[in-house]
Image (cartoon, rainbow, N blue to C red):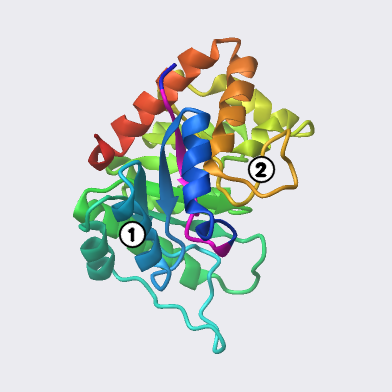
Amino acid sequence: MTPLVDSHCHLDFPELAADIPGILQRMQAQRVGWALCAGVTLERFPAVRALAEAHANLFAAVGVHPDTENEEWQPVQEADIETLCHLAAQPKVVAIGETGLDYYRLSGDLEWQRQRFRTHIRAAAACGKPLIIHTRAAADDTLRVLKEEGADRIGGVFHCFTESAEVARQALHLGFYISFSGIVTFKNAVALKAVAREIPLDRLLVETDSHYLAPVPYRGKRNEPAYVAYVVEEVARLREISVDALAEATTRNFFNLFKDARV
């Protein structure tokens, strides 16, 4: 079987960082050949990059997560185009992100979040790297900003997809891939399972978003890249194709999108 790829995880988070040898061993046991570690703040990025540089089968992305606020007690370095492009030029950095919009936990004037998103899109265009998009309770604005910024010339992936089939169609029209996480294995994710059946096979990715969102049968426990195998099994079942066929497609898609990850 073609080795799998976990297209989005957070191995720098404390829940996983202390167990990297075990995580890599379990990846190998489940035939998970590669994983992409996405950045969430510039402050944390050195740890993300260090993991990618230390392990041949890990890659990195640089970005500031949309719901990371600048608070007096927890200052966050804001990203600018020059900084993002400089960091994206480092070895093993294959994408800009994660970035996007998240209105789920925040309220009030969120223009700062949209401006941060625009900066990431412009950086991706400037340095020729694909985008990793996070969107939650903000699909209309996410798509609007992507269109206004001409993101169809950049492309990328809507990671941990939980939106409607219509949002998926618009994302696909803009040239983006759609990535499914362990949520698609949840019994109550009926609408998402239907979307997973519809996405063209050549535009589909899989991920864990670990340490979050462990798939069935590990739901509620700590997630890790090895568990992407369960996402592949479920999506293959939904699409009525073999696990091998889905593994081959999603791994090929990963390396087609993240061209700097080619090995």
Q: Residues within 10 Å of mark 1 (few under 14, many from 20)?
A: many
Give, as a single range, the part of the protein colored magenta.
Answer: 3-14
Taking depth in this image into account, of 84 and 120 the one nearest to the observer is 84
Q: Amino acid at mark 1?
A: Arg
Q: Where is mark 1, residue-wise? A: 49
Mark 1 vs 2: CB contact within 8 A? no
Q: Quadrant of residue 47?
A: bottom left
Q: Is residue 149 visible?
A: no
SS of the residue under disc 2: loop
Q: Where is mark 2, residue-wise? A: 214
Q: Position of residue 11 (x, y in %)?
A: 49, 54
- Which residue: 54% across, 37% down? 226
- Which residue: 65% across, 70% down? 107
Taking depth in this image into account, of 139 and 195 the one nearest to the observer is 195
Q: Amino acid at mark 2?
A: Ala
- Which residue: 56% across, 25% down? 232
Q: Position of residue 192 (x, y in %)?
A: 66, 32
- Asked if residue 9 is among those painted magenta in the image, a careful observer would answer yes
Q: Residues within 10 Å of mark 2 (few under 14, many from 20)?
A: many
User: Against 1, is 51 above or below?
Assistant: below
Say whether disc 1 or disc 2 marks the residue closer to the N-terminus.
1
- Asked if residue 45 is among those painted magenta in the image, a careful observer would answer no
Quarter of the C terminus within the rendering: top left
Q: Is residue 38 left or right of residue 85?
A: right
Q: Quadrant of residue 233?
A: top right
Quarter of the N terminus within the rendering: top left
Q: Position of residue 100 (x, y in %)?
A: 47, 56
- Which residue: 36% across, 46% down? 58
